[in-house]
Amino acid sequence: MELNQDVQYLKGVGPAKVKLLNILGIHTLEDLITYYPRDYEDRGKPRKIEDLQDGEEALIRAVPTSRFHVINTRRNMKICKLLVSDDTGTIEIVWYNQPYLKDKFTSNKEYSFYGKVSKKAGVITMNSPVFDAENESKNTGKIIPIYPLTYKLSQNMLRQIIENGLKAVDGKLEEILPDYILKDYNLMGINEATYKIHFPKDFEEFKYARLRLAFEELLTMQLLLNNLKYKSIEGHNGIQFDKNVKMSDVINSLPFKLTKAQLRVLEEIDRDMESDKIMNRLLQGDVGSGKTIVAIISAYKAVKSGYQMAIMAPTSILATQHLESFKNVLEPFGIKCELLISNMTKKKKEEIIEKLANGDIDVLVGTHSILEENIVFKNLGLVVTDEQHRFGVNQRSIISAKGKNVDTIVMTATPIPRTLGLILYGDLDISSIDELPPDRKKIETYAVTRAMEDRINNFIKKQVKEGRQCYIVCPLVEENEEIDAKSVMEMVDIYKNQVFTEFRVEYIYGKMKQKEKDQIMQEFKDGKIDILISTTVIEVGVNVPNASLMVIQNAERFGLATLHQLRGRVGRGEYQSYCILKYQGHSDTIMQRMKVMQDTNDGFVISEKDLELRGTGDFFGTKQHGLPEFKVANLFEDINILKQVQVVANKITREDPDLNNEENKKLKKMINKRFSGKIEI
Ligand code: ADP
Ligand code: MG
């Protein structure tokens, strides 16, 4: 069978199963065999009955020592019991409603059982185990893959289907890694690795299968990024912005002193802008570190050198706020700034399009709308994207293509763990603002349970009475308009009509009309609203210095990175600020996460912890960073593989950047397939 064939043609897959497979995102044979296990159970090593512990899952080999008897309970339940023994002890096996199993057992033969052990009051039992007769190894005797499932599809069924799928394509998978890489790094071939990641003989074999697949994933990713970087520095034909335009003219006009870090970063940018190199710079700095002003000063340099500048932000609220900041600083220098968001009249938009094309607008501040095809600049020279993590790798290149050899700065407050940074921004130079403006106070953070509800509400009242404002954030349950609205509305009802009747309470959520959102945000900024209830729409960039308190409901549902971003909305002014994390549950992960938030305000520490706590299986926000998901590789654990991969990738890129050599052609094909529609080599 061919890889792209529909799974319905596979043996043992009828219409009902096709539906279930589709739910799992499995449509083709290729989807099926790359649907990797999320875990494995070691059913390989038998244990002695006397060594078994309460609660563990274990494999035993034992001989039946009682008859198989069935007890009928009053509720019409059939409890089936069988005593089995090895040379160290006896255990009771229990099944429910499976009297037909009776015929499977003969008293003097040995069987393997795998299941959960319970040891209570001296009685040791195993509940509903899977089992095999002496010479069988259908369910035991090996490592068994465990797949993410959907309702009505069992592990056994899926395992069987995948095994059939693997048989159908055995030996037909195309090897894309060149021979020398396979040899140099001692990697399995693709056919072997694909089979063994599902059905390894032992964990050693699993490790090698996984290594091979992770290597390939990381290598294709790295080659693509190398290629982007290569293209961006190819030739020194960047714009040389005017050396006589002095950034210091703007800097001296500001009402505050820039931090050392801001000044250093501006120097780096200034140098790049004046050189003939095309600037591709990542500007990272924790929330509140003052990245916007850096963008504004860079815009000054570009505009006064005779070019246009564009800055793209992920939400209209943020774009609107940026416009204000840009105008405040740049209008006194005669620089014309305009806003472009999706929600504006057709007439206004047409006016902007026209002015942009004939150069009557110097700075365009906007959202994704800037990417639209009909947005054409007269001579765009500098592009900034704010909160880079909200945009894909590809969007970065779309906007740059609206000018010729433009310089770009991408700004992000999402602290990027070192490992991810290596991959994600491999094609960028990095500038860091590693210092906050001096007047900032540490945000005091407290993690509390529901028992503290009244005290928290009193604290909110106290803050508001002192003239401050407060955010209450509740988790967006799903990307679903109704649920989204509902969870906010419930909160609003309680807070507005019961708890804080004497204050002005308003709400905002993602799917609200843009106009309403903008209006509410504006009123909050103007101090007309005391308490703002919201979903995570306020996560990014909004600046209300008078807001000193943030209460986050169900904080356990948010990742650390998000919590940190949210918290960054307070502590932006002169007031001591607070963040209260209300959480439920007390699993280790939750407790650790809450502790991290209480202990540190440092975004980098938090991001490293985040990655660590998420662990295997959940690959740190690659999606939010605009990268495709990794199926096998894990950016936290695979740093060593990544390092090896980078050595190979850099060598390949040096010798054959566009991957046109015969031995690299298959790699190229795979890369273009994996990133299809997004970007191409
Ligand atoms: P972020 O890096 O999170 O985007 P902003 O650029 O929004 O942060 O800056 C946060 C606030 O700090 C803004 O009100 C800005 O005017 C102010 N700010 C920036 N730099 C300084 C500085 N050096 N001293 C004092 N305030 C500053
Ligand atoms: Mg910002």
Image (tube, rainbow, N blue to C red):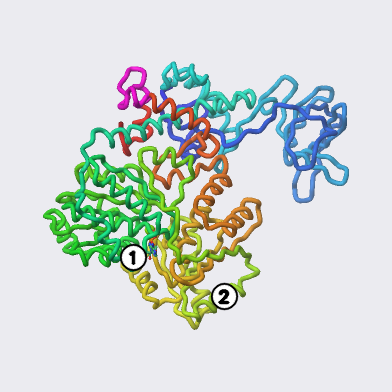
Q: Which residue is mark 1?
A: 513
Residue 551 horizontal side relative to residue 541, left or right: right
Query: For the stretch drawn in magenta, what is the main secondary structure?
Result: helix
Q: Which residue is at 19% across, 62% downward?
A: 336
Q: Quadrant of the N terminus?
A: top left
Q: Nearer the viewer, residue 283 or 240?
A: 240
Amino acid at dot 2: Phe
Q: On the rendered image, what quadrant is the C terminus found in?
A: top left
Q: Residue at x 54, y 79 (%)?
A: 462
**Stretch in magenta:** 652-668
In the figure, 168 relative to 444: above or below?
Answer: above
The question of residue 51 being in magenta is answered with: no
Q: Nearer the viewer, residue 372 or 28?
A: 372
Q: Is residue 402 visible?
A: yes
- Quarter of the rendered image showing ligand 2: bottom left
Residue drawn 32% across the image and 50% down it: 267
Choose the circle earlier in sequence order: 1 or 2.
2
Q: Which residue is mark 2?
A: 459
